[in-house]
Structure formats: structure tokens, C-alpha cells
Image (cartoon, rainbow, N blue to C red):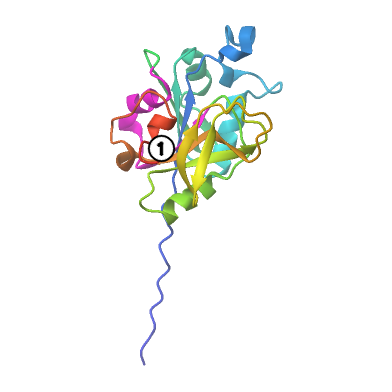
Amino acid sequence: MNKLMHREATPPHRVTQAVILVGGKGTRLGELTTSTPKPLMPINDYFVLLDLLLTNLVRQGFSDILLLAGHFGEQIEKRFQNRKIMGAQIETLIEDLTLGTAGALKNAFSKLQDDFLVLNGDSHFEISFRDQENELRLNPSTEGVIALRNIADAQRHGNAELENGFIVSFEEKVNKRGQNDTLLNAGIYLLRKNTTWGNQFPKFIGKRHFPQACP
């Protein structure tokens, strides 16, 4: 009698690395950030903003977290270096000079995994990062997946134009009050290390960062 051999399907590899950009100066907060970086601003008696972001990442399965620091980086390193949250390891890398958002990634290139999540350490959005990962897996030729947020007024923000689910252009700070269906770049990127830019990173993440998608 022939026996049917059943093999369990190999589960897809999950992205485990999250890179948080925490080098900004937070100048729009004025005196509040003259001695404290924005990611370390308190949200209650026990937690700072970065605690909230880290907890959300760990709950979604990220176990290798890299903090790219600059301005007041020593404060961030003192609080988080080699700290573990529910088993997730945190490492802090401080840049000597201000390199810009993408420049910080270039500086950390040797530490990046093949696929990695990037997000800003001074803002928080309720989002499923695994939904971004699913989009990346469904489109093997895609270089990255950007999270967009629908807002009612684009006057202070740029707008992403979509065609068939792909970003085709970024429009900088639309001067139209009340414009509907404006898609804000939320600053959350799931990227492939080698197929996106190699090690040729531009200075800032934005329109120039995705030349194929944004001619």
C-alpha cells in the first residue's frame, strides 16, 4: 500500500528587523526639545514616545531593533542600549555628523538585514506592519512598501499619487485647503536592502528616494 507523505509547508520568512530614525532635532516643539530629543518626550509618568513605538514593534514580532541616533543620541543610548523588551534586542548607533534620514541608513548599511522596516521615532501611527510585509511578499519585484495615511487637508503635507496600488509621484505640500482623499506619506517603509539602492543611499527619504516610482 502506498503511503501518502505529508510535509508541512515551510512558513514564509518574517521580517524581524526594525530601524527607527531618532536623530532629528524636533525644532517644531520649541523649548520642549532644547535639552531632550523628541523620541524621549514623556507620554505619562513611566513611558516616553519611543517606549510606545518599541512596544508596538515587539508585539508585532520584531526582535532586532536598531536605533539610528544623532541629536542628543547619548540620552537615547543611555536609556535603550542593550535593553531587551519581551526578548527583543535593542542596539543604538550614533552618527558623528547629521546625515539626513537616508544618510543614517547608509551609515548603518552593514547592520541591515535583507528586508527591514524603517520608521520615524518621533511619530506614531496605528498600523499593521505585517500588512506591509504581505504586500512585499505578493510583489517580489517591488523594492519597498510605503505606508500612506488618508488625511482631509494636505496644505501642510505632501500627497502621494497612486495608480493600481503603486505610487507614481509625490506632490509636495499641496496648497489646497480641504482637498479630499489626500494620501500622506506616514514615514513607515518596508524595504529590501540589496535591490533598492545597493549602498547608494540619497540624503533624505522622499521623492528622490524612489526614482523609478517617482519620475
Drawn side of residue 154 relative to residue 202, left or right: right
Q: Split into 4 quadrants, where in the image is the N terminus?
A: bottom left
> Which residue is the site of mark 1?
214
Q: Split into 4 quadrants, where in the image is the C terminus?
A: top left
Q: Callout 1: helix, strand or loop?
A: loop
Does any portion of residue 58 appear in the rendered image? yes
Residue located at (62% from left, 13% from top): 29
Q: Amino acid at mark 1?
A: Cys
Residue 134: x %, y % from top left: 48, 52
Residue located at (40% from left, 14% from top): 98
- State yes or no: residue 16 in magenta: no
Residue 41: quadrant of the picture: top right
The answer to which of 35 and 174 lies nearer the viewer is 174
Drawn side of residue 120 relative to residue 91, left or right: right
Residue 17: x %, y % from top left: 43, 39
Residue 19: x %, y % from top left: 45, 32
Residue located at (30% from left, 31% from top): 110
The answer to which of 113 and 2 lies nearer the viewer is 113
Task: Rate crowding at label 1 as few (under 14), some (14 to 19) or many (20 or more) other CA atoms within 10 Å.
Answer: some
- State yes or no: residue 102 in magenta: yes
Drawn side of residue 173 relative to residue 198, left or right: right
Relative height, residue 12 to residue 87 (above, below):
below
Residue 44: x %, y % from top left: 71, 23
User: Which residues are drawn in magenta?
Assistant: 99-120
